[in-house]
Image (cartoon, rainbow, N blue to C red):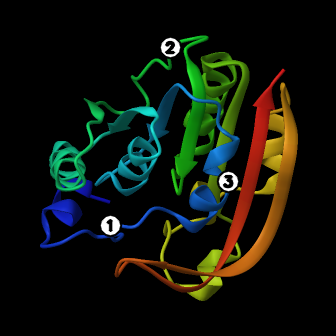
Amino acid sequence: MDWDTRYAEPGYAYGETANDFLVEHADLIPTGNVLCLAEGQGRNAVFLAKQGYTVTAVDSSAIGLEKARTLAAKHGVEIETIHADLANFVIEPGRWQGIVSVFCHLPPALRRQVHAGVTQGLLKGGVLILEAYTPAQLEFATGGPPSAELCMTLDALRDELSQLDWQHGLETEREVIEGKYHFGQAAVVQVIAYKR
């Protein structure tokens, strides 16, 4: 996927509204610093900034992050943006009250590396909120990665995030309406987990 090409299209590829699962549970994140992984055009980061969090959005697409800053200005909030590939991005240990991973699909080895960083990056009491597509999503073809390898399962996440205390872990089907590229019935995995 060439994210610069997708994000250069007119408008916002995944809409301007934050992910439903995040909106429902964002108040579980303690006040403070929140890191949004693979944040793209900024819809989740801007929502969190409007709730009073200090938000850092990291993404591999400079064009996506430019639109994220535009969206933040439209809503009268500020977000920090970091242009980086997650393969080279170091999640600062012990800094974050919240880490948000919404449809951040990575090759398994890199995903394990990032999730190890998430575990180290959260402060005690900090919260991870994650939603991703499961391999069953390939049958729906309503968005998401082109291969099962890039999807996530609850079992794999329980292993990769085993050092966190889980409050919620679920594989389910739900309607995802997020712009023109996530549209329709979808197979997802959802996680809410705390740093001990």
Sequence-earlier tag: 3 or 2: 3
Residue at 36%, 57% (x, y): give it.
Answer: 43
The kind of residue on which mark 1 rests is Glu
Secondary structure, mark 3, is helix
Image coords of residue 87 (percent x, y): 43, 29
Residue for badge 2: 92
Residue at 81%, 54% (x, y): give it.
Answer: 154
Residue at 64%, 85% (x, y): give it.
Answer: 139
Disc 3 residue crowd, few under 14, some 14–19, many 20+, Cα 10 Å: few
Residue for badge 3: 25
Residue at 75%, 50% (x, y): give it.
Answer: 191
* 4 shown above or below 185: above
The kind of residue on which mark 2 rests is Glu
Disc 2 residue crowd, few under 14, some 14–19, many 20+, Cα 10 Å: few
Disc 1 residue crowd, few under 14, some 14–19, many 20+, Cα 10 Å: some
Image coords of residue 115 (percent x, y): 65, 32
Residue 16: give its label. Answer: 1
In the rendered image, the quadrant that contains the C terminus is top right
Q: Mark 3 and mark 2: span between their CA atoms?
A: 23 Å
Residue 97: give its label. Answer: none
The kind of residue on which mark 3 rests is His
* 175 shown above or below 154: below
Sequence-earlier tag: 1 or 2: 1
Q: Is residue 184 left or right of residue 108?
A: left
| CB under 8 Å between discs 1 and 2 | no
Q: Mark 1 and mark 2: span between their CA atoms?
A: 28 Å
Q: Nearer the viewer, residue 110 or 172?
A: 172
* 30 shown above or below 19: above
Q: Nearer the viewer, residue 159 or 180?
A: 180
Q: Is residue 175 left or right of residue 12?
A: right
Image coords of residue 111 (percent x, y): 60, 38
